[in-house]
Image: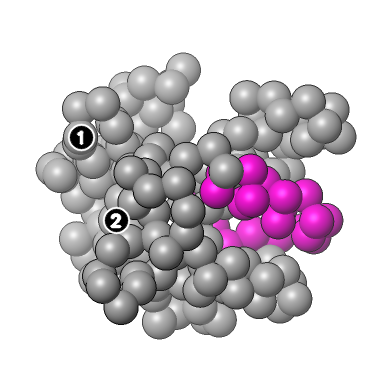
Amino acid sequence: MRFQDNLQVSGGKLTPGRGSAVHAASFLRQRLVILDCELLESASELKRIWLHELLHFVWWRLGNSRRFEWEALLLAERATGELGWSAEWRKDALTEHDRLMRTRKWREYCAESFCDTGAWVATSERQSHPEVTLPSKARQSRLQWWTETIRYNSKGSNALDSSSGSRT
């Protein structure tokens, strides 16, 4: 993890000084998260964004069966709003074709919604953050999925352990 001033992205690449401003970027293969220095001004926002970025690594290792479960949950929601900006702008750009054909846009949305949801679950600002726009019923469904799926059993093994084919 490292901090950098003025994070911006263009064409999927960090472009300091030009492009769209972002709070952070994850580079999974390099095992690197870069956070904007501006986040150091707010501990709660730093925690929320850092958790979101960390969860990209979890999504990467989650396994297809759990990713498909997450996708099914999202498809069943049919709700507007999200639990963070990174998922919401992607959701707003989706078409029915994207959902039905599992396009790259759909899969990127699923990953971002997973990360935003996980950060929302793990922080104390569940109700008060301005980026929380998902209706209560959908929030409860996501929270239930996280509670049932992303948990530790009494032996301390993680439900995300990719070496085991079943939930623990």
Provide the residue designation for mark 2.
50
Q: Quadrant of residue 19?
A: top left
Relative to the observer, which residue lies in front, 132 or 116?
116
* Coloration mode: one colour
Crowdedness near tag 2: few (<14), some (14–19) or many (≥20) residues, C-alpha within 10 Å: many
**Badge 1 vs badge 2, beta-carbon distance below 8 Å:** no
Amino acid beneath label 2: Trp
Secondary element at tag 2: helix
Residue drawn at 15 percent across, 44 percent down:
1
Q: Quote the CA–CA distance across marks 1 and 2.
A: 14 Å
Q: Can residue 59 be seen in this view?
A: no
Residue type indicated by callout 1: Arg
Q: Which residue is drawn at 78% across and 59% down?
A: 77
Point 42% across, 64% down: residue: 168
Image coordinates of residue 38 in percent, x first then y, are 25, 54
Q: Is residue 77 magenta?
A: yes
How far across and how far down the image is residue 36, in percent? 25, 46
Mark 1, residue position = 31
Q: In this view, does 109 lie to the left or right of 121?
A: right
In the depicted structure, whether residue 77 falls above or below residue 141: above
Magenta segment: 66-89
